[in-house]
């Protein structure tokens, strides 16, 4: 399957990261699935839910999947069928998420805009993807990051426990949704630097941020705009955040509690959050 496109089509190649982070992932232990991406939500493996969502988006020109290991593919026949049919390009995953992302990007032509997401994004919908890509194309940024606010999350799912980045202008939760224009791909190299230093916090502070920035964040003085300016200075990539109207975008399945929440949401009546466009 060719993922090349003409620039005027303004379509994205989708890159999906699907490797387990640890050998004892809590979702695989709880469900008995061969890997986390194969755990079922609403009766379907999460990876199939994600692929179905991407297939329903006319802004997506093709899909590259990094992971799971080739030996595991036989454990998910619907996925194996799509790979064999050329509907999905499978690549072996790297040793870490950033390395998997690098591997996937290296497989794609450098002039193709890319949507990056993860196989555990079980509640991803075509509407979420469409909104994110449409708003991303409106910006002059090299890369975009999808977020929801902590107010959205606490209002829609008051019992959900999510990681919140508390900034001067509010709290934000990541959505495992990113876009990269050609220049924006450099952000993945920066991500790899950060990843390599994650177990050396003082080196991370010294080389990537600074004590002043850390203190500014700790004391609630760091704004989103300032944080993105710092990121642009360090990485050479202009990044914008897209606030998504649907709080389901902020739920990925990392813990058993997430799995139970995702199941409960899927089993409820459909609801639309797309009544207004919001972008930072």
Image (tube, rainbow, N blue to C red):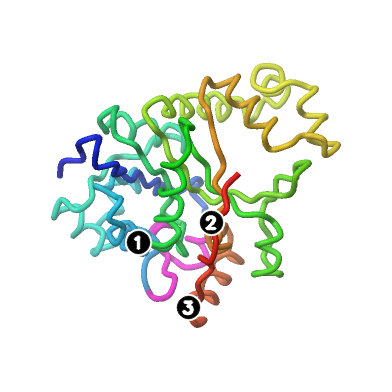
Q: CA distance from mark 1 to mark 2?
A: 20 Å
Q: Give the mark, 1 or 3, whose residue is nearer the N terminus.
A: 1
Disc 3 secondary structure class: loop
> Compared with residue 25, is residue 90 higher up or lower down, i.e. above or below?
above
**Which of the two discs, 1 and 2, sits closer to the camera?**
2
Q: CA distance from mark 2 to mark 3?
A: 20 Å
Q: Residues within 10 Å of mark 3 (few under 14, many from 20)?
A: few
Q: Is residue 250 left or right of residue 89?
A: right
Q: Position of residue 1 (x, y in %)?
A: 15, 45
Q: CA distance from mark 1 to mark 3?
A: 15 Å
Q: Is residue 16 left or right of residue 2?
A: right
Task: Answer yes or no: is residue 227 visible.
Answer: yes
Q: Is residue 71 left or right of residue 28?
A: left
Please state the total of marks drawn on the protein image. Answer: 3
Dots 1, 3 in contact, CB < 8 A = no
The residue that disc 1 covers is 53
Task: Please state which of residues 84 and 106 is positioned toward the viewer in this rendering.
Answer: 106
Q: Which residues are magenta?
A: 27-43
> Compared with residue 246, is residue 163 higher up or lower down, i.e. above or below?
above
- Can you say which quadrant of the picture contains the C terminus? top right
Dots 2, 3 in contact, CB < 8 A = no
Disc 2 secondary structure class: loop
Task: Answer yes or no: is residue 26 visible.
Answer: no
Disc 1 secondary structure class: helix
> Compared with residue 198, is residue 42 higher up or lower down, i.e. above or below?
below
Q: Give the mark, 2 or 3, whose residue is nearer the N terminus.
A: 3
The residue that disc 2 covers is 277
Q: Position of residue 233 (x, y in %)?
A: 60, 19
**Residue sitting at x 43%, y 48%:** 117
Task: Please state which of residues 271 and 74 is positioned toward the viewer in this rendering.
Answer: 271
The residue that disc 3 covers is 270
């Amino acid at each position: 399957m060719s993922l090349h496109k003409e620039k005027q089509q303004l379509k994205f190649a989708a890159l999906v990261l699907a490797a387990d982070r640890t050998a004892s992932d809590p979702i695989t232990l709880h469900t008995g699935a061969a890997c986390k991406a194969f755990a079922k939500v609403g009766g379907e493996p999460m990876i199939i839910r994600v692929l179905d969502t991407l297939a329903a988006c006319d802004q997506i020109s093709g899909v590259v999947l990094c992971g799971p290991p080739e030996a595991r593919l036989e454990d998910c026949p619907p996925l194996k069928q799509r790979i064999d049919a050329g509907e999905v390009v499978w690549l072996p995953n790297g040793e870490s998420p950033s390395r998997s992302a690098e591997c996937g990007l290296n497989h794609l032509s450098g002039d193709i805009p890319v949507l990056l997401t993860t196989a555990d994004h079980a509640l991803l919908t075509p509407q979420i993807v469409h909104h994110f890509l449409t708003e991303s194309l409106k910006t002059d940024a090299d890369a975009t990051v999808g977020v929801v606010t902590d107010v959205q999350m606490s209002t829609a799912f008051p019992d959900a426990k999510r990681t919140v980045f508390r900034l001067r202008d509010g709290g934000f939760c990541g959505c495992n949704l990113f876009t990269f224009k050609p220049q924006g791909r450099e952000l993945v190299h920066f991500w790899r630097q950060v990843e390599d230093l994650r177990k050396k916090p003082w080196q991370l502070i010294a080389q990537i941020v600074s004590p002043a920035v850390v203190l500014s964040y700790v004391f609630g003085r760091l704004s989103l705009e300032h944080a993105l300016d710092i990121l642009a200075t360090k990485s050479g990539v202009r990044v914008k955040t897209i606030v998504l109207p649907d709080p389901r975008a902020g739920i990925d399945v990392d813990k058993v509690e997430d799995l139970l929440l995702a199941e409960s949401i899927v089993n409820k009546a459909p609801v639309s959050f797309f009544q207004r466009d919001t972008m930072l």
